[in-house]
Image (cartoon, rainbow, N blue to C red):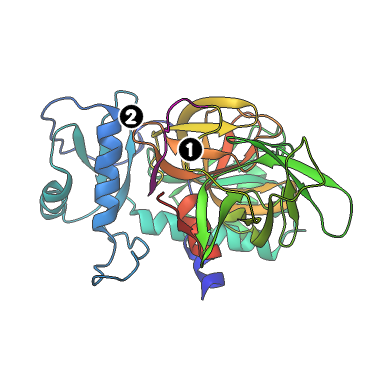
Amino acid sequence: MKKFLFYVALFGTLFISSCSDDLPVSEPDVVENGIVSADISFRKAQDLFDSFRPKVTRGEESRLIEYPENYGGCYIDEEGELHVYITTDFVQTQSDFKTVIGTDGVKYEKCLYSRNELMNLKRQISEYILQNQDAAISKNINHVAYSAKRNRVIVGLRDYSDANVNAFKSLIVNSPAIEFIQANTVEVEQSNDIASGQKIVGTYVSTIERNSGSVGYKAYYGSSLGFVTACHVVETGDAVSLPTDWSTNIAVSEIAMHYGTVDASFCKMSSGWNMLLNVYGETFNPIAPFEGVTVEGAYVKKYGYNGYTDGWVVDESYDANISGVYMMDLAKATYASAGGDSGGLILSGDNGYVMGIHQSGGNLANYCKVGNINYMLGLTLSNW
């Protein structure tokens, strides 16, 4: 079931304009009453997403988000306003959403495609790539992204030409909801060093080879307490040490995964070691121990070996082959990163919610989402 859901719970993102210039969309039905900051817009988006979760009885775990069929996505613009797209039944749906997030600082707009349609289309493309990795057309695809802003699936081709676009349409799928672009073909390299409060070193159980990385967020795996970092830093069974003392194991990975939506490893603390709920080197604790939901345009912060950097989410759901592994539903953001930041903590810059862990960097950075990690590995955020 989980293997199926990680294919379904994927995908997405890019930046740019609104529901797309060529959409036959009349003046967007917009309600603007006052100006709000990006942090308020982020909270409103979280509230809207929470309203899409199936209701649970007391004591049950919160369930995965089930997006309405006429919900077209949302994003936060440069002015901090939240844009919410609706495909059909605009008046009633707008009224329903207003009861959850109101109208201040929110623009309700019509669009052509629902988020579910676009994510299913994105999944279809990614499944073809996974099943035909040696095909020339697959190798020419640099990335596949869901753009909430453009209300499109964006396909970046390494070699953009009419012939290659037509080959894609013939062999994979032909849809007006796809926008083709020339991809920036600078390779995205995985950060294989360390940090996120503190630098760590993962030691492969079968060799003396070591990888450096960063501590992510504090979590539980059943009754085991520990932290999450990147799987390409620490694999299942690998020991974790500090770079100043390789002979002492501070933690051991109990479960890890590096495919699909997740590049993460849960490391159980060794006896005598304690995982704190704060950021290494910070004089105050910026962490609010709640799962954040990624929104295009949201402000995020990275804490890793190379220090603190911040930026904006430009792709809500991003798929690409990264260092030989086809990753899906990553978030792409503008924060700076470098070697050693892998596994580092990503927080919402607006309210301190945990957004995930740093996965890779290049011209832009990618992070694995906390919801995907916790679901696939069976983890729970620690709140103390």
Q: CA distance from mark 2 to mark 1?
A: 30 Å
Q: Position of residue 126 (x, y in %)?
A: 59, 58
What mark, if any, has residue 77 been given in the picture? 2
Choose between 289 and 154: the one closer to the eye: 289
**Residue range highlighted in magenta:** 282-292
Residue visible at 71% across and 52% down? 234
Please tell me whether residue 189 is drawn above or below residue 72 in the rendered image: above
Q: How many neighbours does mark 1 have within 10 angstroms: few (below 14), some (14-19), or many (20 or more)?
A: some
Amino acid at pointer 1: Asn
Residue 371 visible in this rendered orientation of the protein: yes
**Please, what secondary structure does the residue beneath circle 1 have?**
loop
- Residue on which the image places disc 1: 278
Q: Main secondary structure of the magenta part?
A: loop
Q: How many neighbours does mark 2 have within 10 angstroms: few (below 14), some (14-19), or many (20 or more)?
A: some
Residue 10 visible in this rendered orientation of the protein: no
Query: Is 166 left, or right, of 23 in this rendering?
Result: right
The answer to whether residue 287 is magenta is: yes
Q: Position of residue 276 (x, y in %)?
A: 51, 43
Choose between 73 and 41: the one closer to the eye: 41
